[in-house]
């Protein structure tokens, strides 16, 4: 069977971030419900990286397809033996972007969406996916809207989405109509004529004061891009997936966006209502104070944004791949343990 869309995420059963099982169950159940009447053939690939030996695998604790469900769920397990190859193995129990590469390389879909395990897709976002009118020469971004952790997993999906829509705490990502505006007050976007005036002023300022590469870099929607980056499987292969670095994952997702733009793929930012709803958790990066982030960095080294900007300028100017990964990125030549769950196989 051909697959239209592969959705790739990664996790492990260790309660990272707090209430992880609850958030994962909401995510998986949401996709099971939304794909039930879908015209598309969709697979969800969950890469289980370095699973704790004293806890059950995710396939045993997350929702499985029931009769009538169309979503195929694939669990790909990356064992401790592979995780132990990395210097930061103790400080970083899950290498998020390398794990997503494992899913990308094994994805069967024509298009691959890399996302995270604590999200719901808005009705408008899933409708765009349903239309199946994606361009293989583009990469797609969606806003992330944080919603309270009080959302309940036993609510019907309709109630969850209504709660999320009515209780947005904050939004990450660019406005698809006003990408030149960086820090415009919220009220600007409520009045189209005001927003258009500011947008025009920002464009004029950019043409006068910014050099082309700097402007191109600034207009890329890298904010929270790990929660939603969608492009064709061929495009992911072209950019060689995410950079496989022995570092904490922050900003590595942004390098993936830059790599796609450098090779000529066009950015498409979806409308604000076509968003992902991210379930808030206190230990997430966005929840940390600046001082907490400094302490976090001291324990888990990562890439600074300044280095990303410098590398990004070179990549865009010279139309370069990052060229960090070898041909085996995503452990493509490793035979990893895999479990496939679909409605026909469920008792």
Image (spheres, rainbow, N blue to C red):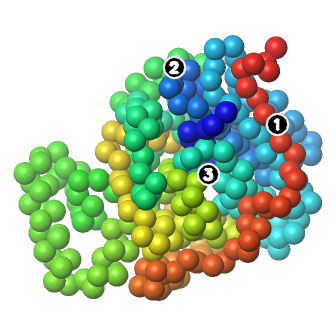
Q: How many marks?
A: 3
Q: Quadrant of the N terminus?
A: top right
Cα separation, mark 1 vs mark 3, equals 30 Å
Choose between 247 and 270: the one closer to the eye. 270
* Numbered circle sitting on residue 283: 3
Q: Tell me: 188 left or right of 58.
A: left
Check the image and report above or below for 13 versus 232.
Answer: above
Q: Residue at x 37, y 33 (%)?
A: 124
Check the image and report above or below for 83 versus 134.
Answer: below
Mark 3 Cα within 10 Å, few/some/many (few <14, many 20+)?
Answer: few
Check the image and report above or below for 280 versus 293.
Answer: above
Q: Residue at x 20, y 77 (%)?
A: 206
* Numbered circle sitting on residue 53: none
Which residue of the protein is positioned furthest toward the front in this rendering?
1
* Numbered circle sitting on residue 339: 1
Instruction: Report which quarter residue 199 is drawn in.
Output: bottom left
Q: Is residue 18 visible?
A: no
Q: Nearer the viewer, mark 2 or mark 3?
A: 2
Choose between 98 and 5: the one closer to the eye. 5
Mark 2 Cα within 10 Å, few/some/many (few <14, many 20+)?
Answer: few
From the image, tell me which residue sits under label 2: 37
> Sequence-wise, which precedes: disc 1 or disc 2?
2
Choose between 276 and 322: the one closer to the eye. 322
Cα separation, mark 2 vs mark 3, equals 36 Å
Cα separation, mark 1 vs mark 2, equals 24 Å
Q: Could you tell me if the residues under marks 2 and 3 are in contact, i.e. CB atoms within 8 Å?
A: no
- Residue 296: give x, y in percent of width and height: 65, 67
Instruction: Report which quarter residue 327 is drawn in.
Output: bottom right
Q: Quadrant of the C terminus?
A: top right
Q: Residue at x 58, y 32 (%)?
A: 41
- Residue 253: give x, y in percent of width and height: 55, 63
């Amino acid at each position: 069977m051909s697959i239209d869309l592969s959705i790739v995420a990664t996790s492990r059963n260790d309660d990272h971030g707090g209430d992880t099982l609850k958030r994962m169950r909401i995510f998986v159940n949401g996709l099971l419900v939304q794909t039930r009447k879908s015209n598309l053939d969709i697979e969800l690939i969950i890469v289980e990286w370095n699973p704790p030996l004293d806890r059950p695998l995710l396939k045993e604790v997350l929702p499985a397809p029931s009769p009538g469900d169309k979503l195929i769920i694939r669990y790909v397990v990356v064992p401790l033996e592979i995780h132990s190859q990395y210097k930061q193995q103790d400080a970083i129990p899950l290498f998020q972007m390398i794990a997503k590469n494992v899913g990308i390389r094994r994805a069967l879909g024509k298009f691959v969406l890399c996302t995270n395990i604590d999200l719901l897709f808005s009705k408008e976002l899933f409708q765009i996916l349903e239309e199946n009118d994606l361009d293989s020469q583009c990469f797609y971004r969606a806003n992330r809207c944080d919603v309270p952790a009080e959302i309940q997993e036993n609510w019907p999906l309709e109630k969850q989405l209504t709660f999320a829509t009515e209780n947005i705490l904050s939004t990450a990502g660019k406005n698809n109509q006003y990408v030149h505006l960086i820090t415009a007050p919220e009220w600007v976007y409520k009045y189209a004529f005001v927003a258009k005036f500011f947008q025009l002023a920002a464009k004029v300022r950019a043409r006068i004061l910014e050099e082309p590469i700097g402007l191109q870099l600034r207009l890329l929607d890298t904010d929270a891009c790990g929660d939603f980056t969608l492009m064709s499987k061929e495009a992911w292969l072209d950019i060689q997936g995410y950079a496989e670095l022995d570092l904490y994952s922050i900003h590595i997702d942004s390098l993936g966006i830059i790599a796609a733009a450098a090779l000529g793929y066009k950015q498409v930012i979806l409308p604000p209502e076509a968003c992902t709803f991210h379930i808030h958790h206190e230990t997430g990066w966005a929840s940390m104070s600046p001082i907490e982030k400094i302490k976090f960095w001291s324990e888990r080294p990562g890439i600074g944004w300044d280095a990303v900007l410098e590398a990004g300028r070179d990549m865009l100017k010279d139309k370069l791949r990052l060229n960090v990964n070898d041909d085996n990125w995503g452990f493509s030549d490793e035979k990893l343990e895999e479990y496939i769950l679909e409605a026909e196989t469920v008792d």
